[in-house]
Image (spheres, grey):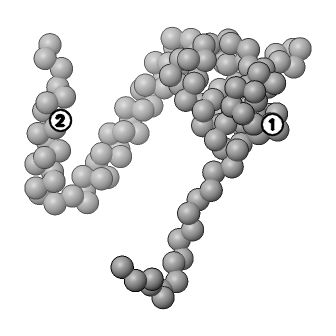
């Protein structure tokens, strides 16, 4: 393999510490490892993640803007508690978006790919 002289235009994305902490916290919230209403302490999280408080603070601020973390009256951060109505709305919206995404993607597939997709969908059908 030789070295190519062509210029590579696509850069490899570098994830900032803030983005890495944001991703870890988001995964914790969505998986339930971080419970509804759980308080998030920047110092503890920074120590756990092995980073300074700044990326943790920035990630918490971003998750607050996204509606997954809230600030209490005493300026503490905690995971937003979702009630059953909110969860129901989320799943209804996902169903709408995911069906639209499948329709759009399937329009770009060849017949053989569509056949495989139909077979997979058949296997996923609920038996009852």
Image height of 14 relative to 117, above or below? below
Image height of 25 relative to 73, above or below? below
- Check contact, mark 2 vs mark 1: CB within 8 A: no
Which quadrant of the view contains residue 25? top right
Residue at 75% over, 27% down: 47
- Label 2 Cα neighbours within 10 Å, binned few <14 / some 14-19 / many ≥20: few
Left or right: where does residue 59 sit relative to residue 123? right
Secondary element under disc 1, as helix, strand or loop, is loop
Pick the residue in front: 103 or 71: 71
Is residue 9 at all visible to an observer of this figure? yes
Residue 54 screen position, x and y as percent: 82, 38
Secondary element under disc 2, as helix, strand or loop, is helix
Q: Which residue is mark 1?
A: 52
Left or right: where does residue 29 sit relative to residue 110? right
Residue 8 screen position, x and y as percent: 51, 78
Residue 70 screen position, x and y as percent: 74, 22
- Label 1 Cα neighbours within 10 Å, binned few <14 / some 14-19 / many ≥20: some
Residue at 51% over, 11% down: 84
Give the mark, 2 or 1, whose residue is nearer the N terminus: 1
Q: Quadrant of the C terminus?
A: top left
Left or right: where does residue 53 sit relative to residue 35? right
Count all numbered tags in the image, as a single digit: 2
């Amino acid at each position: 393999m030789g070295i190519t002289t062509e210029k590579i235009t696509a850069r490899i994305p570098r994830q900032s510490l803030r983005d890495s902490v944001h991703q870890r916290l988001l995964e914790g919230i969505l998986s339930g490892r971080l419970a509804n209403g759980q308080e998030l302490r920047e110092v503890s999280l920074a120590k756990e993640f092995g980073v300074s408080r700044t990326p943790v603070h920035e990630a918490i601020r971003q998750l607050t803007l996204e509606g997954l973390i809230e600030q209490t009256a005493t300026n503490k951060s905690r995971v937003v508690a979702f009630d059953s109505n909110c969860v129901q709305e989320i799943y209804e919206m996902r169903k709408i978006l995911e069906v639209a995404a499948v329709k759009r993607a399937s329009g770009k597939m060849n017949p053989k790919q569509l056949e495989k997709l139909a077979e997979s969908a058949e296997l996923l059908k609920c038996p009852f």
